[in-house]
Amino acid sequence: MPRLIIISNRLPVTVNKKQGELHYYPSAGGLATGLNSLDETLDKIWIGWPGQALDDQWERESVKHHLAKDGLVPVFLSEEDIELYYEGFSNKVIWPHFHYFPQYTSYEDHYWEAYKEVNKKFAEVVIESIQPDDMVWVHDYQLLLLPALIRETYPDISIGFFLHIPFPSYELFRMLPWREQILRGMLGADQIGFHTFDYMRHFLSAAYRITGYEHYFGKLTVGKRMVNTDVFPMGIDYENYAFPDVEEDARSGMERIRRQTQGRKLVITIDRLDYTKGIPSRVKVFGRFLKKYPEYKTKVSFVLIVVPSRSNVDQYRDLKTEIDTLVGEFNSQYGTFDWTPILYFYRSLNFSELTTLYKVAEIAMITPLRDGMNLVAKEYIAAKEESKKGVLILSEMAGAANELYDALIVNPQDINEMADALKTALEMDEGEQRARLEKMQMRLKKYNVKNWAEDFINEQMRLMEEQKGENTNLLTEQDIQGLIEAYHKAKDRLIVLDYDGTLMEFHPDPMAVVPDEDLLTLLQSLKGQAGNQVVVSSGRDRDTLDKWLGPTGIDLAAEHGVWVKMGNRWKSAHGVVNAWKKDIRPVLDNMVERTPGSFIEEKQYSLAWHYRMTDKDLGEKRVREFRDTLLYLTANLDLQVLEGNKVVEIKNAGVNKGKAMLNWLSERDWDFIMAIGDDHTDEDTFKVMPPRAFTIKVGMAKTAARFQVVSVGNVRALLERLV
């Protein structure tokens, strides 16, 4: 089993320097809990900042030595690093922007430079610590560039990355000047995990629109690698909150709270001080609630817990002032001598206090304006394991809402809806409370933080096996050796190659992919070897193929098999006609008019509508719109509608690449046959090949081919090895 190298901004241990002495404290948090719960047989190393700026070399060595005992490796940062990388780029650029607060995004170049430099510092420590067979797991928004930096030194190592905050929509993400560098940093990983499908979807959209990488069911081909994206909603240590080991404290604490609130219904809300949490709006919701339902005055107490955070940042100081003012005004307006409507605490709670509040509160109102997951909501549900009484009001903008759909889900911007939800919660009968809680508890028990960590690691291990070629039809080194051996033993060899997406990468302009000198030399070398018959079978028109590849002397098949060139002479397939084009052309012209960036390619016996330079979603929408129209128009004309890579082509039915290949297959009894292609038009070629043929699909789509490779680079490398 490989070692696991965990990398996060902070270590699970904090170093604190007091009066010249170093003290070590464990760090709380779901990440530490989840990763510490992994199988003990898994050898782990954790790399991160120890929480203290240490400039003295002796102190650094002392910390290194002390942490090494627990498998921890420190990354030392200066005060300036912390200010510019952490407080600067991480929390003044990434944090607000990814949480949909672009008005707080700071576009400072020196923040970005510091962010790059600190990610490099992390990379240097990681590279010193890891071995080639290790498995790496990088965490969160502070280290978005790290996967690619590690990949530069260890191109074959397995790297996972998990984002613990939202990934914003493309329209928002594109505003960042450093958008492409951030994406390419993340794409250095083999597996990228998100809390929800929405975050994953936004990432895939940005990756395609900014870097050009298209996904197939969440998998992207990046160079010669396959990058998997998936959803891993983070859980909690359920048993810890369901049965907390603080029974005496909890009992006395619950009684004390009950005495102080004189039996009133308790609504709790617990958040770190942050503008993403919507704390001021919750105070306003309580005010709206009391105005709409005055009968609840003096019967409900609102416990507002705000945990101090980033008090040196202007927005946070302003937020604290706003909350203080709102609560003061609220209690002055609504309070009585024996009732304080809002019990406001600006401090951290210890575990005993926290779980006691969870257990005693009838309602938890967790309504952030935007939140990656929000584990507080899950902790509250777990704390109701024994009583089965309690109601959760949860923002639809929290990642947890995707799992806790039996909560009262609200729009955090809709004050009236939240006020009504509060009334619903207060009046909900115990039977419904129990039913809702039990459904959510069942989910949280099953998918706790341990399962979250194990799922991510297990999936990454599975991907590692796939990279080695196990449990997949990826062409392995062993397969290549067998192919080369068969090639050299054979006397008569047929080699069939597609062009676009197989020998040359796709380009927005189809005419821009003129074969380079290396490719022409490669094809001539293949043809020049005794016994070889090389065929390029493409959807392109015959004039273009002749112009580009004719000088090599290889055979050609054009327009998906309409034209065949064996030797020096072109011949067309039997029965092809083109009179139909006058009826179909106006439909395609209309598509071009309505779809900016699209264009028509007219071939002798076919028409193709290209949308490579069009917005992907718009192009696919047009395809869906016109598919039925085209099928109707072509039904009685003996035509076929083909959907390829960003292209729709109308051609004569009964003609395809597979039928064209029969011209060569029937020539002789070939000792060796190899066919390589990338899209579904090449499936016809694969299907006519004998079972012993080496059929190879470029890309990870479902295929009739025996083998698959990831990229054009893999194809070229294979052909070079043959010659």
Image (spheres, grey):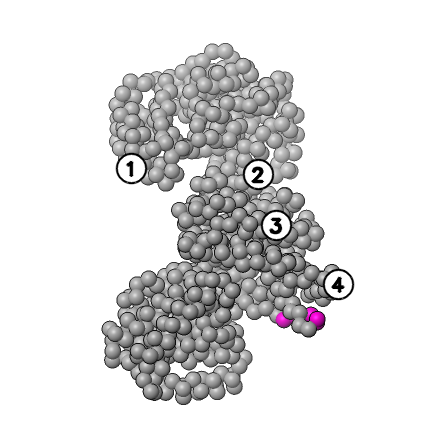
- Relative to 441, residue 176 above or below: above
Q: Mark 4 falls on what kind of element?
A: helix
Q: Mark 3 falls on what kind of element?
A: helix
Q: Amino acid at mark 4?
A: Trp
- The picture places residue 674, in percent across and down from the top left corner, at 55, 28
Image-based side of 333 in relation to 99, left or right: left
- Per the model, the C-alpha gap separating discs 2 and 4 is 44 Å
Dot 3 alpha-carbon crowd within 10 angstroms: few under 14, some 14 to 19, many 20 or more: some
Whether residue 299 is in magenta: the answer is no
- Disc on res. 224: 2
- The picture places residue 33, in percent across and down from the top left corner, at 56, 67
Asked whether residue 635 is in view, the answer is: no
Q: Amino acid at mark 1?
A: Glu
Q: Earlier in the sequence, mark 2 or mark 3?
A: 3
Report which residue position mark 4 lands on.
58
Report which residue position mark 1 lands on.
625
